[in-house]
Image (cartoon, rainbow, N blue to C red):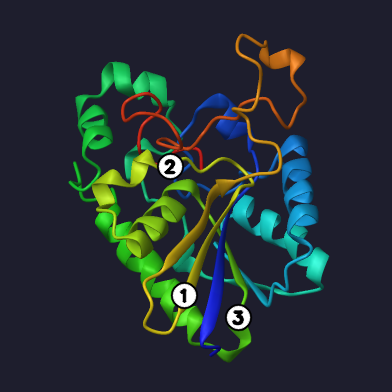
Amino acid sequence: MENKQTLLFVRHGQTSWNVEHRLPGRLPGIPLTDQGRQQVARLADALSVLPISAIISSPLERARDTAEILAQAWGLEVWLEPDLMDTDVGHWAGERYDELLKKDPAWKAFVQDPTVAPSPDVETFPQVQQRAVAAVERWRQRPEAGAWPLFVAHADVIKLLLAHYSGLPPVRAPLLGIDNASVSIVELEGELPPRLVAVGWTPRPGWLRPPGAHASAASPAAAPVAASPGAGSQPGEKGTIEGEA
């Protein structure tokens, strides 16, 4: 392993469930939209100057599709890592955020404090963080990862990875904004503290619009996508769990 590593964490592109504000959890069959593929292609172009050495992805379709588009830019294969999968939201998978907030007190409580599981089938943020960090650290030690490994995952997974490397408590991770097809970068070198180089950077951020501009007037890339619960929102707006994602 190189003494210095630059870790890139990329969130998958937009899916129809992002637009519909639905919690996908780990449900299969949720591909990228055409706009999502365009978002990822733009990101690949923006990152093409970097010497990406490996691409490791969550096996869920939306992440895997994103990884495959990115991999084409460097001629790399995609390695799948189950521990980068989205938060397991159990019986809430497929539900709409807004409906859950109206009718389910347990969901509202979980949004406010995702460190406490309301039922055995739902993962807590500390559990998600533990498996995701362990996966990244395992891959960091593998020779094929190289000095510039890129990990494709989901909004809350990325938030929790960034929280780990920056010393932020898991309960505060929702404060980080992670848009679709954005990249976050962490530099690790020897015994030095981790350095956060970028958080949720995207070539065309959804918030970069004149005040009052109508969404339809913006370019497709600039139109706001359904952020993962907590991706730049306050707890309770769209949830803190990466339902979209």
Disc 3 designates what residue?
147
Percent across and percent down for residue 78 are 68, 71
Percent across and percent down for residue 79 are 62, 74
Which is nearer the N-term, disc 1 or disc 2?
A: 1
Compared across the picture, whether 28 is left or right of 42 comes to left
Can residue 108 be seen here? yes
Disc 2 designates what residue?
242
Q: Which residue corresponds to the image point at 48% horizontal and 87% vertical from the top-left? A: 141
Percent across and percent down for residue 88 are 37, 50
Residue type at mark 3: give it: Ala
Residue type at mark 1: give it: Leu
Which is nearer the N-term, disc 3 or disc 2?
A: 3
Q: Secondary structure at mark 2?
A: loop
Q: CA distance from mark 3 to mark 2?
A: 29 Å
Compared across the picture, whether 56 is left or right of 78 comes to left
Q: CA distance from mark 1 to mark 2?
A: 26 Å
Task: Mark 3 and mark 2 in contact? Answer it, CB < 8 Å.
Answer: no
Disc 1 designates what residue?
188
